[in-house]
Image (tube, rainbow, N blue to C red):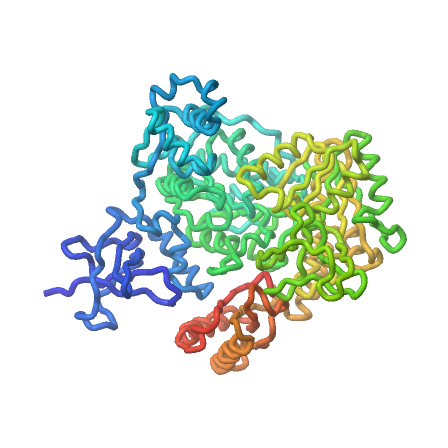
Amino acid sequence: MAKAPILKVAINVPLSRTFDYLAPAGAAVPTPGSRVEVPFGRRRQVGMVLGTADRSDLPQERIRRATAALDDEPLLADPDLWLIRFTSDYYHHPIGEVTAAAIPALLRQGRELKPSIKCVAITDAGSQSDIETLAKRAPRQAELLELLLDAGGNGMDVETLAEQMPTWRPTAKALLEKGLVSRFETRAFDPEVTAAGAGEPGPELNDDQAAAVRAIRESSGFSANVLDGVTGSGKTEVYLHLIADIIAAGKQVLVLVPEIGLTPQLVARFRKRLGVEPALLHSGLTDLQRLTAWRQARSGDAKLVVGTRSAIFTPLPAVGLVIVDEEHDHSFKQQEGLRYSARDLAIARANHLDIPVVLGSATPTLEMLKHCLDGNYRHLQLPRRAGAAKPPQVRLVDLGVAASEEGLSEPLAAAIESHLASDGQVLMYLNRRGFAPTLICTMCGHVAECRRCDSRMTVHAKDRQLRCHHCGSARPLDEFCGECGEAVRPLGEGTQRLEDALLRRFPQYSVMRIDSDSTQHKGSMDEALGRATRGEADILVGTQMLSKGHHFPKLTLVGIVNADQGLFGTDFRSDERLAQSVIQVAGRAGRESRVGEVIIQTGFPNHIFWQRLIEGGYARVASDALLEREASHWPPYSRLALLRSAAPRRADAHAFLELAAERVRSLAGERLRALGPVDAPMARRAGRYRAQLLVQGFDRRALHEVLRELRPALESEPLARKVRWSIDVDPVELF
């Protein structure tokens, strides 16, 4: 009698292996890519079948049986399973956690692909009721009826309803008793994803854009294309022509963007030009909305999928092109849990599927430029702005000569006045939110510090709070020093303080601040960007959220307030990142017919960095940085993996990494260097002491061979239970 096949099941636990189970009693053997419910310890878990085997390391009698098969057909196809295995292998992360990250939350919970959903709808009696009269005595009830009336006969699912009206439940109860609303369950359905009608024609491509489109169109199979275009050069037009080709051929396109804030303008443009409704995948969606978009992509109904980094795992049965917009943005790298790079996975996925990938940026990473120099990737350049737009004029303001008050020097203030008087719009860039970064005692010099982190508390004056931007802790704003009792004052500038200073200096003009504090509520970011784009705010104050991808037609002046913030960073990528942020934010100015101006306030106008940037632009900074990296053996001329540990006791965090360092040295010999362990740059964060071990080598294969043996060895160490630890391959942050 033939033995029953063994299911290899990935379970969402931090262990680097699959688990063996038998098929559920009386059921067919589940296909790889389908979910099963399995007993795991004393509880039941939802797992994903990744394959089957004829034998197990366990005796047959010890192999437990899955309790249920959850899918009639596989959720994931072979290419999707390949990406999961590749991600787990490359980033040395437990495959169960990778699998969990690759599917929507509702599916991880064991819900059906098309789950039943709870809905609320207005009844006939509710539709005929006098809502105006009701509003006078029960405004919340009237508000709910209005929402449901707008939703139509199908009603509204409770998740969406909770988003729009968080306190709907007691209100709905009252309306239920009156017979004005009803509650019911229904099966989820997918709305139509393709908009009616053809898309609108766009502008004619210039020679550089046309050459880029032609080069990608004519490529056969896999090709990695770095679309290196100055800000305003029309990279999106290139994307649109390529996407139109792919959709016309009956295939799908995946577009990755670094932040959800970039999606509104981009999606509106896609919708208008292509005549299709993109399926969106990002963290701002409800679980049901995310599952719906995922299902549309998986079925092939969604021809265009736009999403942030986790969208890289979306099943796409007919994908023909992957686009990574703003590839340089470090938001593409997940910094917690599974530490993957969506950009790098996009390249790997395209290579596996033998399709092109386009990596767009005005400031490509040195890694991408090195690939271009080596001939691995195609370097497609757009050196001129599209249409009549001219590059902005850049000048430095020496803060040693022109002192600033609350972030504003007189030359910058005069330029603001001039641009506003000529009906221009101004953007003030300061990548530091809050009112001030420090609260200091005027007498003894004591600084307000976080009690859980080795960091200073940030002043948030509007809320009368001190907040830690690392652990999130907050406490009331002090008026007097806790050490000597004397008065305290805020030191330095944040976006709130700059906003207040601008309101006082230019009271006749409107000022709008856009940062993570001002856009906390759902839809507030979209609303703010819409107002900014329409020119409804004269002066914009923002952080890096405003530095990339946005098009403000009236914007003519960009002021960079604290440009020296990244000039003396400890990270070897400091110059590259500072150049990227300056070029990106400067590129918002003068994108229409008027010439833009960029003013950079600096205390070091003669620094070599500023000379390189102003004389040769990003290309000069990148070229010199590549030479420096090669001489110092930093990436892209070497390979890195960063092991981190955190524990309530500093000794435990270090001891664990000492074990790791010994293992690396014994496994690698002379092939790799283990540097550390040392305290992290911020040694204590959220009450835990942090340490790190940097593993460096020139041979990628050797690095991965060592890490492949290292992870299971560390998992078996007793000390691993006392610390939180991770392996970060190709780290973009050494913090």
Q: Is residue 632 above or below residue 600?
A: below
Residue 731 as seen in the image, left or right of residue 124: right
The residue at the point 28 percent across, 63 percent down is: 40
Residue 149 as seen in the image, left or right of residue 501: left
The answer to which image quadrant residue 539 occupies is top right
Residue that extends furthest to the left in the rendered view of this protein: 1
Q: Nearer the viewer, residue 312 or 524?
A: 524
The residue at the point 52 percent across, 70 percent down is: 646
Say which quadrant the N terminus sits in: bottom left
The answer to whether residue 378 of the structure is visible from this angle is yes
Q: Is residue 78 above or below residue 306?
A: below
The residue at the point 85 percent across, 40 percent down is: 414
Residue 371 x %, y %: 58, 58
Q: Nearer the viewer, residue 663 or 506?
A: 506
The answer to whether residue 583 of the structure is visible from this angle is no
Residue 443 x %, y %: 81, 63
Q: Is residue 372 above or below residue 315?
A: below
